[in-house]
Amino acid sequence: MEYNTLSMAYQVPEPKIFGCTQSTVLAEKIARFYGTDLGNVIFSRYSDGEFQPSFEESIRGTRIFVIGSTNPGPENLMEMLLMLDAAKRASARHITAVMPYFGWARQDRKDKPRVPIAAKLVAKMLEAAGATRIITMDLHADQIQGFFEKPVDHLFASTLFLPYLKSLNLDNLTIASPDMGGSKRAYAYSKALECDVVICYKQREKANVISHMELIGDVNGKNVVLVDDLVDTAGTLTKAADLMMERGAKSVRAITTHALLSGKAYERVEQSKLTELIVTDSIPMKKQSEKIRVLSCAELFADVMHRVHHNTSIASKFLM
């Protein structure tokens, strides 16, 4: 009887939210939307670059969310792994890795002999470190979810982009995919917006270098929106935008969830015929640009985290 009374009196504690270094700003936004403060964690660093995270408050028996995108360099992934391991050893009840951008995802298969499948390796490392659940957004390939043995909540940035696109009230709207691999995503957007689709066919010399691009479909007199999961060097998007303008498009915009924007990406975007590039804040921007509009994903993640903690459905967040 005494045991039952104690059990009834025990309540599941509210979750605690922590942020990795490079995602601190986004983590603070997510915590604010969730209605709490970001948890206290410090990073001790040695002179050789080695670092050690430390939770400066008790997390025993609680659910914790560790927020951090794992875009290269490797420090971002290592931070996440060490945070998960520290949480596991501190007896956290549930450890959810919240990864707005799941890095290394472009290596999701063997496209030639003697290469790794990095996305699979990262999935196994996250689970070994202690993650009991993964929340991420717009994976480079949907099948990466199958690399995990733990539950994966795969969110779609379409919940952010579609309302914005509708607010523009563009006539003769056409959705475009910058490559054949993104055609499924483009068709999903076109269905939601009830418009046509065109596809770019490209051939690469090597990674990040395009040798040839052709357009499948008509863009003459159309307001075109290119849809992709990430933008790295911006070579594909800007080349596609220039090609479409040459073929008679009225305007070309691009929406990409993850703004890696490495190398000469900013210069290419500025000098291109893109009207604007719309991205999320899953990855911190290196600098500002008048052509780049950032939509925050903080409220989306906060809402999903709240639903996960309270065991309610998140199906309404899957528009695609």
Image (tube, helix red, strand yellow):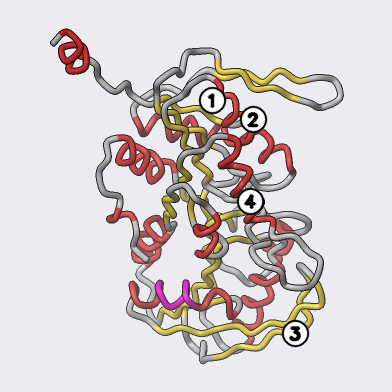
Mark 3 vs mark 4, CA separation in Å:
27 Å
Please name the residue that numbered disc 4 is placed on.
Answer: 103
- Work out whether mark 1 precedes mark 2 in sequence or the reverse, and give the earlier one: 2
| Nearer the observer, 101 or 174 | 101
Q: CA distance from mark 1 to mark 2?
A: 9 Å
Q: If you read the primary sequence from the N terminus, does the residue marked by circle 2 or circle 4 appear first?
A: 2
Q: Is residue 187 magenta?
A: yes
216, above or below 37, in the image: below
Q: Position of residue 187 (x, y in %)?
A: 43, 78
- Left or right of 239? Residue 60 is left
The span shown in magenta is 184-188
For label 2, the residue is 82
Q: Is residue 236 above or below residue 65?
A: below
As helix, strand or loop, the secondary structure at mark 4 comes to loop
Q: CA distance from mark 2 to mark 3?
A: 43 Å
Contact (Cβ within 8 Å) of mark 3 with mark 4:
no
Q: In screen coordinates, is 83 left or right of 299?
A: right
Residue at the spot of label 1: 87
Circle 1 or circle 4, nearest the eye = 1
**Considering the numbered disc 1 on the image, is that residue within a helix, a strand or a loop?**
helix
